[in-house]
Image: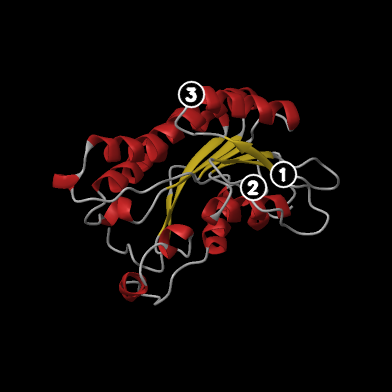
Amino acid sequence: MSAGAGAGPDGAGDGAVGPVVLVTGGSRGIGLACALRLQRGGARVAVTYRSVPPKEEGDEGTVPLLPLRCDVTSPFETESTFSAVEEQLGPVAVLVCAAGVTSDSLLLRMGEDRWDEVIATDLTACYRFARRALGPMLRARRGRIVLISSVVALSGNPGQTNYAAAKAGLIGFARSLAREVASRSITVNVVAPGVTATDMLAALSEEQRARLVSEVPLGRMASPDEVAAAVGFLVGEEAAYITGAVIPVDGGLGMGH
């Protein structure tokens, strides 16, 4: 399968079995777009969801996504998720961490509960999933890890100190891990979306969305599929020499940061 469609380190071709992919937060938005893109490329894809599983969709003839209910902040549920994937599909060759939450507040009004929730979901969960995925990847001497960060990690945003801290933390985490595992042909990269048409953005007022879009040089928001295209490239064979990179998909919003 083509790299753009999401060929992983076990890329399928001439009847070969596609790689096993695990996407956290894969029931909607960017996570679901990534899962469907990689599935269309021939991958066997499992997705985690917290409350509502992904809708049955995809191209005719594709194998349905494997939905697994998981609170990504729970070590026990993280382990049970990997066990289920390994039992039903095989060892994870590609990990995409897309699960995330926001809980906005100015810092002076931000209680520790808001801080802890965002850090646990957006940063600590990625540490936990990446650590669990690494064992089989190291033994196979190949693997792909892609973390979904945000333009806010570099630019900052009032009222989002918790979110910005978590998303910026992913960059340092990814670059450190990339150096640790590069000798085993495992790549670790970050995709940093900007204003993207997701449920998170839909919760804002029309005036707020218009203000955000007005700051984007390209003058529009991204679609989840455009973010997924970058992820598909990074897990493909054509990106085998890219690691520790931060790929912006933000319409130019983060230029200069």
Assess whether mark 1 and mark 2 are in contact (beta carbons under 8 angstroms).
yes
Q: Is residue 19 above or below residue 254?
A: above
Of tags 1 and 3, the one toward the viewer is: 3
What amino acid type is highlighted by mark number 2? Glu
| The quadrant where residue 230 appears | bottom right
How packed mark 3 is, by other alpha carbons closer than 10 Å (few <14, some 14-19, many 20 or more), is some
Is 84 in front, or is 1? 84
What amino acid type is highlighted by mark number 3? Pro
Residue 232 can be seen in this image = no
Provide residue 84's location: percent of width, then percent of height: 67, 28
Judged from this view, the residue extending furthest toward the front is: 51
| Sequence-earlier tag: 1 or 3 | 1
| The quadrant where residue 77 appears | top right
Q: Which residue is mark 2?
A: 237
Q: Which residue is mark 3?
A: 75
Q: Residue at x 79, y 52 (%)?
A: 62
Assess whether mark 2 and mark 3 are in contact (beta carbons under 8 angstroms).
no
Of tags 2 and 1, the one toward the viewer is: 1
Secondary structure beneath dot 1 equals loop
Q: Could you tell me which quadrant the C terminus lies in? A: bottom left
Secondary structure beneath dot 2 equals helix
Provide residue 224's location: percent of width, then percent of height: 53, 61
Provide residue 138's location: percent of width, then percent of height: 58, 25
Q: Which residue is mark 1?
A: 11
Is 240 in front, or is 79? 79
Provide residue 112's location: percent of width, then percent of height: 24, 35
| Sequence-earlier tag: 3 or 2 | 3
